[in-house]
Structure formats: C-alpha cells, structure tokens
Image (tube, grey):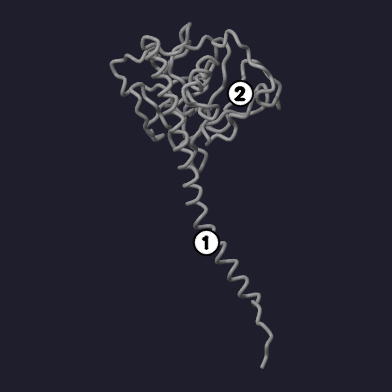
Amino acid sequence: MNNLKRGFTLIELLVVIAVIALLMAILMPALQMAKEQAKKITCSNNLKQIGISLHMYGNENDNRLPLNESGNWMWDIAYSTTDYIIATGGDRKTFYCPSDPLKTPDMAILWQFSQSLPFGTAINSVPEPKTNRGSQFRVTGYFWMMDTVNGRSYHPEGTPTKDWVKTLTHKQAASTELVTDATLSSTSDPETATFTEVHGGSWSNWQIPDRTNHLRRGAKPAGANIIFLDGHNEWRHFSEMQVRVSPPYHWW
C-alpha cells in the first residue's frame, strides 16, 4: 500500500487562488459599502449630539444660539461653543466626520487652528487660553449655520442675503439647516469640480487639502447628513444639494 500523501497539483492551486480572488472581488465592494454606512451612522450620531447640545444651550439662554466672534469658513467654531457641547455629552470626535481621513480629532493644528500651531504638534501639548475662548476657533468637519457676532460676510449665490440662524425660534424650523456635513468643491460645476482638492488655510500652512465628507466612487459626493433647527436629522442625496456659498463652493 502506498502511504504517501497526495499534495495539490499546480493547476489545483491556481484554481483555488482564482476562486479566492473572485470571492474577494465580489465581497470587497459590499464590505466597503458596509464600512461607509457605518461611518454615515457615526456621522449622523455626531450631528444628533450637536443638535441636542445646541438646543440645551438655547433653552438656557432665551432661545439664543452661540455665535462665533471670529473664524473664516463655515466649519470654524468657537472654543466656547465646543466647550459647551463637550460638557453636555460630546467629545472631540463629535466634531469630525469619520469619512474624512484628512481631518481627525487628534490633529492639534485643526483642533487649535486659531493658535497657529506648527505642523506635527501633539494634541493637548500646547495649552489653550483659559479666557476669551469665544475669540478662538477650531476647524471642524461640519458646516455651522449659526450667524456670527458681526454677521456673516458671505451669502448664497444669486441671493442678496441669507437668514443665518441666531435663535431656536424660527417659523420654518423643520426646513432650516442648523449643522451639515462639509460638502465643498473647487468650482460650481459638479461634473468637472474636484471635491477632494480644495485649497484653504490648511493648504497654505501645511499642504493639506480640504475635501468633502461623504464621497462615492469617482470621488463625487454621495450626500450629506443634516441636523435641522427643529432637532430632526436626515440624509440629503447630492442630487438634491445646491451650491449655497462661495468661494470655495459650499453645498447643502
């Protein structure tokens, strides 16, 4: 009797490898979709927490919302506002969408943006000022629709003004955006614009481009999570979004 064990032939090994490769090709898109869906849910929960905190702030301040004293783009928010949101249930992760790998809660240059820290500074290694925290601001992953102390200097394209949010009392609270996913581009044409290489302060300082949060294949936006003034949260597909502010081109 021949007790020698028979091994795989080269052809059999190639067939096994081919089958594994085929299965990976089938499963990878599904795994990517599941991963992105999980990120969308985390992002949605971030906005829910922000909405809850802002409503708590308004309830304690005669329905008024916190207004920035400084900042440039719509994702800039005052230290004092983040202080309140963290004190009422949030943390640093609450202010960043997990779909954007270029903005994370561990980046001191963004979390303490107005302090002009050197690239590579470790988080919490440079103390934050204890006073005048309303005049310092962070770069986050979301657009904040609240007005500023001095009034926002930009407005939606084609319109003279926008009713930027100042209070919780609004006649159309269910359709008034409070905070949205960051969705921005280099030009207003969605077919030719880049949504991954928008140059702002992070580029001029450290060559880090700004980008849209939720991207589908082809690096085009999938859509955005939005928390509305009445507290409800919904997903808006990119086909329903418009350029609202420029430059650069902000969509919601």
Q: Is residue 129 left or right of residue 40?
A: right
The three-letter amino acid code for the residue at tag 2 is: Leu
Q: Secondary structure at mark 1?
A: helix
Q: Going 52% across and 53% down the picture, which residue do you hit? A: 28
Q: Which mark is residue 195?
A: none
Disc 1 residue crowd, few under 14, some 14–19, many 20+, Cα 10 Å: few
The first of marks 1 and 2 along the sequence is: 1
Front residue of 232/127: it is 127
Q: Going 57% across and 62% down the picture, which residue do you hit? A: 21
Return the residue at label 2.
Answer: 110
Q: Position of residue 103 (x, y in %)?
A: 58, 30
Image quadrant containing the C terminus:
top left
Q: CA distance from mark 1 to mark 2?
A: 41 Å
Q: Secondary structure at mark 2?
A: helix
Q: Going 65% across and 15% down the picture, which residue do you hit? A: 115
Q: Which image quarter: residue 118?
A: top right
Disc 2 residue crowd, few under 14, some 14–19, many 20+, Cα 10 Å: many
Q: Which mark is residue 23?
A: 1
Front residue of 109/62: it is 62
